[in-house]
Image (tube, coloured by chain):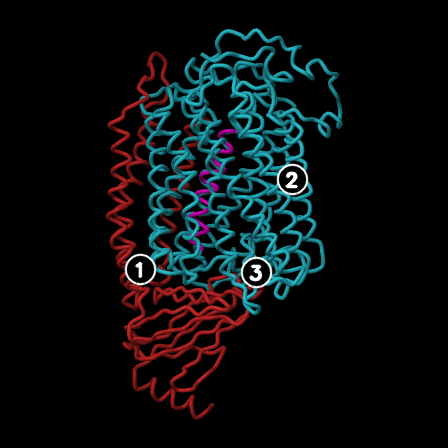
Amino acid sequence: MEAGTLGRMDQIPAAAHPGAGAKARTGILKWLLTTDHKLIGVMYLWLAFTFFSIGGVFALFMRAQLAQPGLQILRPDIYNQLMSLHGTFMIFFFTIPVMAGLANYAVPIQVGARDMAFPKVNAVSFWMLVPAGCLMLASLFLQGGSAAAGWTSYPPLADRQYSPGPGVDLWILGLHLAGASSILGAINFIVTIVNLRAPGMSMMKLPMFAWAVLVTQSIIVVATPVLAGALTMALTDRMFGTAFFKPTAGGDPVLWQHLFWFYSHPAVYIMVLPGMGMISQVLPVFASKRLFGYKGMVFATAGIGGVGFLVWGHHMFATGIDERIRVFFSAASMIIAVPTGIKIWSWLATIWGGSIRFRTPMLFGCGFISLFVIGGITGVWLAIVPFDVQVHDTYFVVAHLHYVLFGGSLMSIFAGFYYWFPKISGRMYNEFWGKVHFWLTFVGMNLTFMPMHFAGLYGMPRRIYTYMPKFTIWNEISTVGAAVLGVAMTIFMLNILISLRRGARAPIDPWEHKEFNRTLEWTVTSPPPAENFAEIPVVR
Amino acid sequence: MKTQTLGKLGLAALAALAWTALAAAPAGAWLDNPVTPVAHDVRALFFKAVGITAIFFLTAQALLLVAVLRFRSKPGVKPATFHENVRLEVVWTAVPILALAILAGPTFTSLHYMDTVPKSDLNIEIIGHQWFWEYRYPKYNVTFANEPLVIPAGKIVSADVTSIDVVHSWFMPDFGIKLDANPGRVNHTWFQVEKTGSYVGQCAELCGVLHAEMRITVNVVSDEEFKRWIEQKRKGA
């Protein structure tokens, strides 16, 4: 049984809740001082989409530089800076926060709570992210520029000797803040989902998005402190002369790679699991069918979260680690395809036989399945060590990761964003321009990233500001695709900004949910009132 | 403009992409020009993987396409109500496990093959610098940098790879070789190039500003030519 329906109202009156009836703040203070999960969620979304725009513009500059071999649009050092910040922003300041934003908004309502378990901590989480992003952005304008050793910042390249400017230091501090923000947020989410569920909302009635968020936040609690430790070691190497990663003093750069990927591979699931949760919400609504295999979905989500910790070594197949270790990581990386496959088949079974309404969230939902399957299949190929060694650090991996993070995470983010936009803003978006956005994104995405597979198979390394002439055709197509994506995202931004002011008023439930796929946020007004529920609902 | 029109335009654009991709001349690499036993092996393994995974890929995309075309909401048509089928779920868990097991066998065999350095005819040392490669032939006491590596065709060459500064990666697509050059560690690999000729590759691990310019050229020559060349190098040194 998914997502229990609203039953009889509980007897707790709203006024019995502390804080209810307090004088509402207006203007800027309403935002600066708020501890309301909905306002914080909205601020997360604004921040995330701001960094999405910045990271996207960086990507367009990179694609312009790579349109032809030998162009001089960006200096090599600037190219490396934009490339490093593109990865860092899209991962730490867009995908993770945008998921946190949507989860902040939807999860407390979905579980039937008035707010997150620790509302002030929630505000702290958000406000730590703002200086974190600003530090990184600011480093672009300092002497020596920003970090330029990739979002992976492998030492010794990222060490003081080879990256002398303050860029890497600010990058480390920025990630420290973002990491602390995400750990605090994770504890908050876990406590909220485990303890603040409305009466009757048993774990196996939890909406699939809330389940995905619970697993994701559990990953964050385990993985992020390891990144924090590694970052601290890198910082003391740079600042205080320690030698954790310095080969010249007995340290080992490969140690950083292990610690970094111990966090950063699970980070892929941190970025994609909430999106899978959103897809599991969206498909049943627009196919007018129950989610297929709810229990299987829950176990698959937990399984991905667990096995996700055992596969980090597949990022290091070319570092010369022992053959037996590679056999283990190869097998584990293949196994993770099984729970992922369970999800794909269950989604297909969900829409099979349904009565599908192709509103924008559904288009992005179907686009997600199609593109994510491609990223999943190339993921299995990459688990095959001898093949991985061929294409590791080439554009093939760039293509693969964008099919997972663009085709997977971003498509699901758009599905979820359009789905909840009427609830969050109280306005409807423009459906026609939403569909134009989808088709331009779907086509532009394939134009941009499909050719990268071939460039990589033929041996074009990633992270290069120019390339051998034999790779020209693939890069030309990619750059055209990137331009299409630029247009698509501009249309998206304009549609949303205009709809925020001029969109038609959204009713309580614009999607006409069926009894069996309605979650609690669709039983309250759009946007929901302060503290969400006049009376805490009881779930049957 | 209707959604269906948008959809058709989208699919047309994708078809155009596929056509352009096919029309583009192959660039030459391990994929269509493998010149070592390892590269041949990887190529065969890759096609095996493509074959096995294609079944799942095509099934998923076809089901999605059919569902999207067939189950569009129509007035008067009620959606199905099934939402569980244990037998189906067991099948789609077990079949991929089986397929992966089939794939795992040759994967580990190939890995062992490429990872085991055989008794070699010639040993060289490859040392990465920002942003050039240094090559050493310890047996002949020859060292040089920033010029093509020269090796004899048909002979088994073993290589010890390391770096003097940051992490580099020695990447020769036609040979099926990519190996990180880590400062403070020495990695080992081997290759046996079948055909004489000049082959190109480049550094594959971001190593700083001029990473993109850190190219590799390997001239594979006949055994006699190699002997003449190394003698000359030795005298010149």
- Which chain gets the cyan colouring? A
The verdict on a common chain for dots 1 and 2 is no
| Circle 1 residue | B111
Q: Chain of mark 3?
A: A
- Which chain gets the red colouring? B
Residue A411 within the magenta-colored segment of the rendering: yes
What span is in magenta? Answer: A395-416
Residue A23 coordinates in the image, percent (x, y): 75, 16
Q: Dividing the image into 4 quarters, which one contains the N terminus of chain A?
A: top left
Q: CA distance from mark 1 to mark 3?
A: 31 Å
- Crowding near the residue tagged with mark 1, few <14, some 14–19, many ≥20 C-alpha atoms within 10 Å: many
Residue B172 coordinates in the image, percent (x, y): 39, 67
Q: Which mark is residue A154?
A: none
Q: Is residue A93 above or below residue B64?
A: below
Closer to the camera, B217 or A31?
A: A31
**Is the residue under label 2 in contact with that under label 1 (CB below 8 Å)?**
no
| Circle 3 residue | A244
Residue B204 coordinates in the image, percent (x, y): 46, 62
Q: CA distance from mark 3 to mark 2?
A: 28 Å
Q: Is residue A171 above or below residue A130?
A: below
Closer to the camera, A254 or A480?
A: A254
Q: Secondary structure at mark 1?
A: helix
Closer to the camera, A153 or A28?
A: A153
Q: Amino acid at mark 3?
A: Phe
Q: Quadrant of residue A389?
A: bottom left
Q: Amino acid at mark 1?
A: Leu
On the rendered structure, is A335 left or right of A461? Answer: left
* Residue shown at the point (43%, 93%) measured from the top left: B235
| Circle 2 residue | A129
Q: CA distance from mark 1 to mark 2?
A: 43 Å
